[in-house]
Amino acid sequence: MNIKEIFALSIDALRERKTRSALTIMMVVVGSSLMVALNGMTAGFSNFISFQFSKLAPNVLFVTSAQAQSGGDPFGGGPPPVPKITLNEAVVSRIRSLPFVSDVIPSYQGAITLEAGGRKHDTTVFSIDPQKLYVIAPTTTFFEGSSIRQNDPSAIILAERVANPPGDSTPFAVVGQTLRATYTFVDPDTGKQEKETRSFVVSGIMKATGNPTIDNAVVFNRIAGNQMLHKAGKYDALLVAADSGDFVDAVEKEIRRLYGKDIGITTPKAILETIQQFIGGFSSFTTSIALVALLVGAVGIITTLYTSVTERIREIGTMKAIGAQNSFILVLFLVEALTIGVIGATAGMGVGIMGGYVLIAGFASQDPSSQNMTPVFLPQDMGTVWGLSVGLSVLAGMYPAWRASRTAPIVALRRE
């Protein structure tokens, strides 16, 4: 009997047990589709992150002061941590004089509440020379009517998500509108909570740049930031621009040589590497979950074929009585397992692709900034999942097929 006839007999056997065969195939579909969907979503997320970071200036280092440990108890008592080094104009001048440094951009940062037209919006402020936005985020663009008034302490620039909050039908603020900003702080002399309120005029609205530092913030110049946030000339962070991305490591070493561990340095490259490591770990975790589902499908195949062997014992005995060899019986049941695996794995590819888009759509609905993210289905990954699904199916059918092939014809024909 040739292989074509063996496939025909196997398919007929599966058709006779439609419900059981369909449920077994469904188990394989669930496992393989889950692996495809999660792999596609993870690859898409990785590509999206890489694309977003490609918008950042690769030559910019983010410098902050390390925090000294306070003498308070571990449950919050005692004074708060203090910076090990004060970032002031002296530090700015010293870093600016280092080799390969093209610019140093000091910034003040804080949390403020904006009020416009009876509506309030909590956001962060990024107080720098507004013209330096193009250094930090080269892709910065503005909506029509915007202007940069770098020497005007009453001018404020809003990020698109601040001016037009996601989910709101009307904008929070428009260009030319006056709004009030309130900063809440603790007076270091009295220990009492105080508020500083100032009025600003919206001079511009930035389109999304892909830089999370400014895409969720407002910007006004350093004069306004120093006064409103009560910084007394002490900067929260310095953005150091190297001559090019090739000199970032050299600049970082020079800054470390000056300040050691008293200063914190972060680069877009380091952030991207950290995120990619997290994505890799997450991918391994989700793949292990999908693999468990696939193994459950393999157990289902064992159960189905073992039950099939029991039910078809007299059929096996008859085939052996008319001359069927053990190898024929073995191949017959292995082909049934192979058929279940091929159908389940193939269907799982299609279901997994659709599932990947559904998962991405659900993620994007929670975070509008990721609406451009799409799943990525790599041919090699798809092939690996398909081969793994089929391979596990055949492997799962080995024992029932071996059991069927070893059945003695006399014993089988005596079975009721």
Image: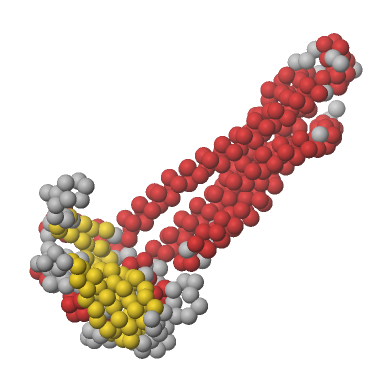
Q: Residue at x 31, y 70 (%)?
A: 124
Q: Looking at this view, is 363 or 264 the one in front?
A: 363
Q: Looking at this view, is 73 or 222 the one in front?
A: 73
In this rendering, is residue 370 above or below 71? below
| Quadrant (top left/top right/bottom left/bottom right) for the N terminus | top right
Residue that lies at the very extreme toward the top in this rendered image: 410
- Examine the rendering and report whether any part of residue 50 can be seen: yes
The x, y position of residue 335, in whole percent, is 75, 32
Residue that lies at the very extreme toward the right in this rendered image: 322
Q: Residue at x 29, y 84 (%)?
A: 200
Q: How many marks?
A: 0
The x, y position of residue 210, in whole percent, is 40, 68
Left or right: residue 183 compared with residue 144: left
- Examine the rendering and report whether any part of residue 156 can be seen: no
The x, y position of residue 290, in whole percent, is 56, 41
The x, y position of residue 373, in whole percent, is 51, 62
| Quadrant (top left/top right/bottom left/bottom right) for the C terminus | top right
In this rendering, is residue 40 above or below 385? below
In this rendering, is residue 322 above or below 34? above
Q: How is the image coloured?
A: secondary structure
Left or right: residue 212 compared with residue 11: left
Q: Residue at x 29, y 78 (%)?
A: 181
Q: Residue at x 33, y 86 (%)?
A: 178
Residue 292 in which image quadrant: top right
Residue 114 in which image quadrant: bottom left
Q: Looking at this view, is 38 or 368 the one in front?
A: 368
